[in-house]
């Protein structure tokens, strides 16, 4: 069986230099995202385009989505924060500038931050995210400061501007606002030009596309084809988040958010052309920690801003960090052996299953590649698709209300309907532990709950569970008996 394009076992299919770039990058490598942490620093407040799905919010600690931050930082404050966090969270491997506006609409602040980091934290990978409008103008600076991962948000490749005009009301171009189809055509031309320049220089590109039902859902396969032509490394299809309380144009005008099922359909339509990122969490502009967690509230300005550079440099112990990363790599190698290399990244149902029939498996985990989280504490579920031949990771699904509110409030009195709706198309739930009451509730949606794989490697357990319940002789006999 073939291996995940982003796991440590995929070195046969990816060039060695690319593997070195992605191995400990939690966004570019699915295999790294449960082990390595990232930090986003909010040094780029200005933006040069308006997106109907975006609202840049400040001091919104209860929201986790792009464009949201609790505070802005100067480049000096940002670097101090990174050194402080890198000492506290030694598995930190990546720094990204992703807003709350656009990194390249704030070039002075963005590149001053990268310049200081290049000197003070040379072991960190540096990334930026951009809408691409100014990308061709800053290729030299990106390369100069060793920013070798760039994410470009591109939602349409429609050259008429018809689709883009429904997403972008205006862009700021040559010191004036340009509207409608003309704005969309200028933006697309600049995006494609910039992406081509990046890939020609060996800079890894991840493309983000926001799935907007009824607007660009039919357009995304065309986006995937174009990205492949341009040599983009990874395509991330993100669901539109458009609750009214987010204050976006779409949210206030009734545009529906994208469902999990719609995202899966888009992934299937695009996945044959492009490698897909399936583990994105649509992080805040000031996110800290592992993907899927946010420890930003632990690192307020008060904790680091008054420290001097000598003190911070000492705290950011590169040797200790290197030792921590080696421990992580040793653990990942052990997991790879335990998982028997069964995981694949891009696969049709026929590649997963000899019958073309597959099952969905939900997993609760706190990271490190094992089933190590109680059902009651789960705020998200990792979703895998599996057959009798192989498995693939599909997506994560969040829930706003975990079943258990705390160690003293886990009596099952809280509603489970949101979780049932989130897992309504899932066949098996693998968790560290689950009580009788929630298990009975989940049986009502025909969900098999199993905590016998507690603390075991995820991929191996997913494959084993699907064989046990659906492909073993016993399972087949039970199915025949009805």
Image (cartoon, rainbow, N blue to C red):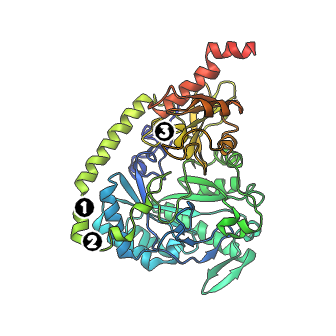
| Quadrant of the rendering where the C terminus is positioned | top right
Q: Observer-nearest residue: 141 or 257?
A: 257
Residue that carries the numbered disc 1 in the rendered image = 315
| 64 horizontally vs 33: left or right | right
Q: Secondary structure at mark 1?
A: helix
The tag on residue 373 is 3
Residue that carries the numbered disc 2 in the rendered image = 307
Kindly check if marks 1 and 2 are in contact, taking CB atoms under 8 A apart as contact. yes
Question: As drawn, which residue projects farthest toward the bottom?
Answer: 175
Q: Observer-nearest residue: 469 or 171?
A: 469
| 253 horizontally vs 353: left or right | right
CA neighbours of label 2 inside 10 A, class few (<14), some (14 to 19), many (20+): few
The image shows residue 246 at horizontal and vertical percentages of 65, 66
Q: Observer-nearest residue: 223 or 73?
A: 73
The image shows residue 358 at horizontal and vertical percentages of 66, 30
Q: CA distance from mark 3 to mark 2?
A: 36 Å
Kindly check if marks 3 and 2 are in contact, taking CB atoms under 8 A apart as contact. no
Q: Earlier in the sequence, mark 3 or mark 2?
A: 2
Q: Earlier in the sequence, mark 1 or mark 2?
A: 2
Q: Secondary structure at mark 3?
A: loop
CA neighbours of label 1 inside 10 A, class few (<14), some (14 to 19), many (20+): some
């Amino acid at each position: 069986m073939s291996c995940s394009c982003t796991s440590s076992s995929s070195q046969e299919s990816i060039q060695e230099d690319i593997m070195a770039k992605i191995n400990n990058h939690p966004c570019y490598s699915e295999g790294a995202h449960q082990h390595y942490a990232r930090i986003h620093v909010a040094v780029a407040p200005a933006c040069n385009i308006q997106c109907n799905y975006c609202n840049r919010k400040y001091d919104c600690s209860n929201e986790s989505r792009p464009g949201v931050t609790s505070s802005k930082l100067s480049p000096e404050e940002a670097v101090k924060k990174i050194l402080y966090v890198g000492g506290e969270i030694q598995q930190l491997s990546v720094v990204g500038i992703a807003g709350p506006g656009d990194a390249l609409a704030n070039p002075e602040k963005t590149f001053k931050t990268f310049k200081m980091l290049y000197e003070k934290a040379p072991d960190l990978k540096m990334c930026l995210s951009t809408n691409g409008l100014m990308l061709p103008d800053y290729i030299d600076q990106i390369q100069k400061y060793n920013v070798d991962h760039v994410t470009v948000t591109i939602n349409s490749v429609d050259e008429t501007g018809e689709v883009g005009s429904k997403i972008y009301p205006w862009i700021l171009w040559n010191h004036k606002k340009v509207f409608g189809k003309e704005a969309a055509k200028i933006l697309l031309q600049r995006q494609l030009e910039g992406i081509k320049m990046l890939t020609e220089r060996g800079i890894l590109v991840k493309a983000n596309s926001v799935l907007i039902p009824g607007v660009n859902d039919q357009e995304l396969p065309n986006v995937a084809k174009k990205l492949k032509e341009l040599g983009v490394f990874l395509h991330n299809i993100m669901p539109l988040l458009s609750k009214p309380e987010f204050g976006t144009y779409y949210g206030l005008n009734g545009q529906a958010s994208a469902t999990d099922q719609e995202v899966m359909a888009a992934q299937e339509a695009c996945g044959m052309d492009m490698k897909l990122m399936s583990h994105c969490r649509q992080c805040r502009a000031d996110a800290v920690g592992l993907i899927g967690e946010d420890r930003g509230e632990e690192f307020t300005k008060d904790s680091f801003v008054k420290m001097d550079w000598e003190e911070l440099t000492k705290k950011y112990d590169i040797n200790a960090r290197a030792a921590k990363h080696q421990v992580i790599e040793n653990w990942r190698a052990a997991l790879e052996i335990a998982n028997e290399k069964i995981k694949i990244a891009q696969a049709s149902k026929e590649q997963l299953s000899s019958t073309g029939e597959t099952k969905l498996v939900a997993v609760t985990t706190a990271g490190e590649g094992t089933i190590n989280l109680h059902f009651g504490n789960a705020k998200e579920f990792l979703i895998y698709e599996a057959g009798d031949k192989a498995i693939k990771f599909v997506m994560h699904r969040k829930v706003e209300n975990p079943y258990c509110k705390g160690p003293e409030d886990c009596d099952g009195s809280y509603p489970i309907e949101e979780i049932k709706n989130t897992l309504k198309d899932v066949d098996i739930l693998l968790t560290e532990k689950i009580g009788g009451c929630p298990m009975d509730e989940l049986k009502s949606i025909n969900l098999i709950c199993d905590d016998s794989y507690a603390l075991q490697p995820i991929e191996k357990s997913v494959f084993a569970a699907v064989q046990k319940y659906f492909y073993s002789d016993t399972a087949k006999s039970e199915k025949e008996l009805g």
